[in-house]
């Protein structure tokens, strides 16, 4: 236990969101003081059953939807503030809004400066 | 220790597989009750030495192969069942079949409902 | 504590680097005995403020830069050697060189052989 945010540790917040929420999520992250992030185009499915459709007489199944993965590593900003900021910006209230996962990070390094640990984030 | 699957914790299973095994892996995951997943196109290399080839007289090296990364976060389903299901569906017996890694997840949130922890997964 | 590298555990080194440093990073990883890796095309931003530009009279903001994510899981090679090798190969001294994060991996499996744990890496 410590008074430092994240008990002195480093956290990686991984959010899978709708692509059209990325702009608002970036703004929300900057507002809570965690502007740094890595973005990956992904596809995925949640708990809804696959959708069946027809195209020119052929049946097809849509089960993977385009999403965007946002990874945000923080030390000085509490992970919970980052989670809340992403949630607020990504939430539409409809199924498919996405998930947020928080992982512990054992160490970090900033390549240019060689800084290690929380200072590197 | 606890009787709950994954000792009450949340696990992220990260599998790097052959692209043409994705369909079977999705079915296998659904069968063990873990249908939710995130898919990323990646490339990579394992322990085999790089292959050298010739193209129009120029030598080139193939050292990165197209793969697919599947991430599957679970709470109620034991990580080992997910690992076994992916392995069975992804295994061809040839080099390049891929790897599976299991990471601990400290927290989770479902964006639409605001649910936290294992219930969010 | 143990004399084994990484105290007997498995580590995932996640590096976000400039795309044009990937070739040198691959060579550096091979040199330290950790040639296996997974590569993802990503975009991201660090701590520099967004750049504003003009195009045909329209203002636009460049805030996401193309980067490459390299993931390298090791057991027998100390994570610190991998971090140092990546840093040396990725470092240009200019802002935007990237970050390296180290995560603990709870388990691993090689799909072809079924090997588990550090031997699977
Ligand atoms: N358990 C999980 N493991 C890995 N990725 C997941 C998981 N759950 C969701 N995702 C990712 O998040 C994306 C959006 O998920 P989604 O919001 O549909 O989750 P859900 O649980 O079905 O919630 P909802 O009922 O609100 O739709 C998925 O397409 C997938 O990429
Ligand atoms: N240690 C590792 N770290 C990160 N990614 C890995 C690692 N090992 C394998 N991968 C990923 O998995 C993909 C497939 O690996 P591969 O199956 O060739 O592993 P391998 O150890 O060489 O096993 P095999 O001898 O069966 O080929 C690679 O292209 C890479 O993307
Ligand atoms: N805290 C972070 N969380 C997630 N990704 C990050 C983080 N910091 C950097 N990255 C990723 O690394 C890439 C390069 O970051 P960058 O090197 O600009 O970091 P920086 O802290 O601004 O350092 P520098 O001052 O040397 O530029 C970013 O585009 C982003 O993809
Ligand atoms: Mg859903
Ligand atoms: Mg191989
Ligand atoms: Mg920067």
Image (cartoon, coloured by chain):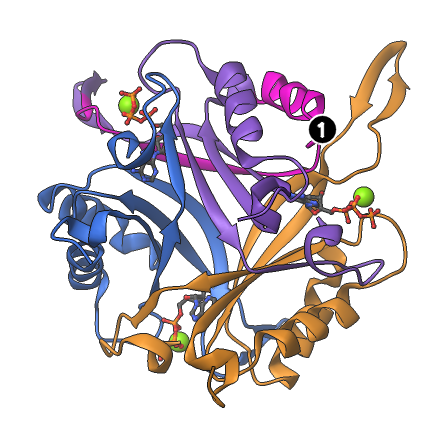
Chain colours: A purple, B blue, C orange
- In the figure, is residue A39 to the left or right of A61? right
Please state the extent of the stretch shown in magenta in the rendering: A22-51
Quarter of the figure with residue B54: bottom right
- In the figure, is residue B17 to the left or right of C66? left
- In the figure, is residue C27 to the left or right of B105? right
Which residue is the site of mark 1?
A33
Q: Is residue A71 above or below residue A22?
A: below
User: Disc 1 beta carbon < 8 A from ligand 3?
Assistant: no
Q: Where residue C4 sits in the image (x, y, percent)? A: 47, 88
Q: Is residue C14 above or below residue C116?
A: above
Quadrant (top left/top right/bottom left/bottom right) for the C terminus of chain B: top left
Q: Where residue B22 sits in the image (x, y, percent)? A: 27, 49
Query: In terms of secondary structure, where does tag 1 sit?
Result: loop
Asked whether the viewer can see residue B58, the reply is: no
* Chain of the residue under label 1: A
Does B72 appear in magenta?
no
């Amino acid at each position: 236990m410590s008074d430092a945010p994240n008990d002195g540790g480093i956290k990686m917040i991984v959010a899978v969101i709708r692509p059209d929420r990325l702009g608002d999520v970036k703004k929300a992250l900057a507002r809570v003081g965690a502007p740094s992030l890595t973005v990956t185009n992904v596809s995925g499915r949640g708990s809804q059953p696959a959708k069946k459709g027809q195209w020119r007489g052929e049946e097809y199944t849509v089960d993977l939807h385009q999403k965007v993965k946002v990874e945000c590593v923080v030390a000085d900003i509490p992970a919970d503030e980052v989670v809340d900021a992403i949630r607020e910006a990504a939430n539409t209230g409809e199924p498919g809004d996405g998930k947020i996962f928080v992982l512990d990070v054992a160490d970090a390094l900033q390549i240019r400066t060689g800084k290690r640990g929380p200072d590197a984030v």
